[in-house]
Image: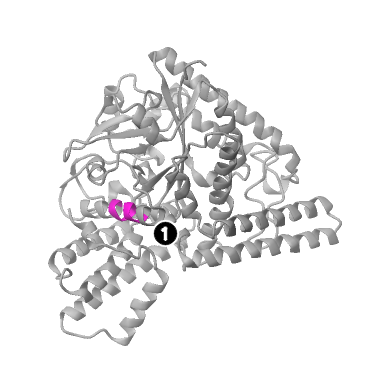
Amino acid sequence: MSEPLGSFCLVLHGHLPYVLHHGYWPHGEDWLYEAAAETYLPILDMIAEVHQLGGRPAITVGLTPVLLEQMAHDRFKQCFREYLEERIARAEHDRKEFESRNELHFAYLAKRWGEWYARTADQFEGMKRDIPSTFGRWAKEGIIEILTGYATHGYTPLLLEDSCIRAQIRAGIASTRRILGIQPTGLWLPECAYRPAGQWYPAVDFGGPRDRLAVEQMLADEGITHFFIEDPLVPTNIGDEKARLFYDQLSDDRKRFIHECGDWRPTVGPIGLRSPSNGAVLAAYARCREVCEQVWSGWIGYPGTGAYLEFHKKYGERRGLRYWKVTHAQSGLGEKDPYYPDDVPGVIHQQAGHFTNLIRQTLRDHRNRYGRPGVVIASFDAELFGHWWFEGPRFLRDLLLNLHHDPEIHVSTVHDELSRRPPERFHRLPEFSWGEGSDNRVWINDRTRWMWEVEYRAEAKFGRNTFHLPWQKDKQIRDLLERAARELLLLQASDWPFVVARGQAVDYGIRRFALHDNRYEIVNNVIDRILDGNKISPLEEHQLRDGEIHDSVFPKIDLAWWNM
């Protein structure tokens, strides 16, 4: 058997903001139910099938703590089952309607949808309605790796207080450990947003400059050994003119990094970062852009193939099912042809083979250039597979089975890859993210600046309260500060400024952000009244109870998480 050219690590990042008790359709709990039915259950089914067939489904799955908290919640377990029953009934209604019009192919597709959702319901019941524990079982058996994350996906470069970043990390690890029963060592940085140590000016006018810690120091202090960043280099496949414009827009620190890192490429392996607090070495892995774009590119990506199920065109009002295929990636919804499932397996087989060849060639090119094995990190949003690209989990199944039979490619979790090949190159990373311009403009701009003004006031007030108030001795004050902490975590989710800036679910994003700020202020007002010697009024009791019902997440808050 020939020596492998290198390793392939598939990384899927799963995240959704907290939506339980906060609306249904088009924004709210339906997001979570769709993701569970179309992404997380199919991925678990894919892992089990590849393992049963003797392959190695050694994938790395990021499940953000707020996503885990929701899928472990009793409300999700009950309402998701009801959602699946509604889907089955919707499919049956569509089938009868199509048959009444003699549209027999659409009736056949509706019948398939009913059967698909029925199998999904059986799968959910078979795991006792516990999706997180099933992921945890695969992780405990060493088949897959689970990444943790910040509690609510807080956007690191813009958060004001280091104590709040520590709390996001600590709360996230605590949730992963409690729900899955594992101690994670890998973490997905929210929005792949890295920030270095040094002097920093708050993003909005909120006092003068302050010194802040680097991400790696806070991660190392909590036992994290590796995390993920966007490829920080200039793309090599966009043409000289576009590459020059891309480079010109970069920060001076980013340009310095590109010049100093020499011939480093993501396939070389991780960038090493050493924590100044305890000397621990952390590994920062970057995605292999040229390989990944074969999947996620809007122009050449596999999901845009004409035979695949069209995501955007649905039948009927609200929650409609999908019966059309992509046809042409640039065609309008009125130009879509009916979906033909029998056309799909051959396309998946061909594209899985093409992707396998691309990975092999990338690793071969690396070996020819550097004379040693390389690694391809292929990282994607998990919801691409199944939700946005319905056939995605079957593509992953065929890909992993192909790779299992390829002696030149070693399939590995990132944890195992790190144990074999720790970082050899150390560089000082600049601040950057995956967003437009590789900076913070997606999260702070003219549409969202006010959100950060609110956020900074909330962080500063929480810091003062946890420092000055006697919560260690006064149970009532501790209980109220824990409620305030929960609302602060929910307020910090990067999702709210993101959807506002992108014009997606703007009303929902603003409403949710304002709601958590309002509940946060209500708790603080109650604390002030108690400190003044007053009792909690019936209205305040109702307001506190309302927050407890709607924001019943992170049930075990520890105020020590905010201690530096």
Q: Residue at x 42, y 33 (%)?
A: 287
Name which quarter of the figure residue 336 lies in.
Answer: top right
The stretch drawn in magenta includes residue 172: yes
Q: Is residue 238 left or right of residue 262?
A: right
How far from the left and from the top, in percent, is residue 309?
A: 67, 45
Above or below 303: residue 461: below
What colouring method underlies this structural image? one colour
Q: Secondary structure at mark 1?
A: helix
Q: Is residue 90 above or below residue 155?
A: below
Residue at image point 39% right, 29% down: 245
Q: Is residue 308 above or below residue 38?
A: above
The spot of residue 49 in percent (x, y) is 60, 41
Query: In this picture, is 148 found above or below 121?
Result: above
The residue stretch that appears in magenta? 169-175
Residue at label 1?
69
Which residue is at a point 20% across and 64% down the rendered structure image? Answer: 461
Q: Residue 472, percent across and down?
A: 16, 68
Viewer-proximal residue, 19 or 430?
19
Asked if residue 502 can be seen in this view, the reply is yes
Residue type pointed to by label 1: Glu
Residue 166 placement (x, y as % from top left): 25, 51
Q: Relative to residue 519, is residue 502 drawn left or right?
A: right
Residue at the image position 30 percent from the left and 69 percent from the top: 483
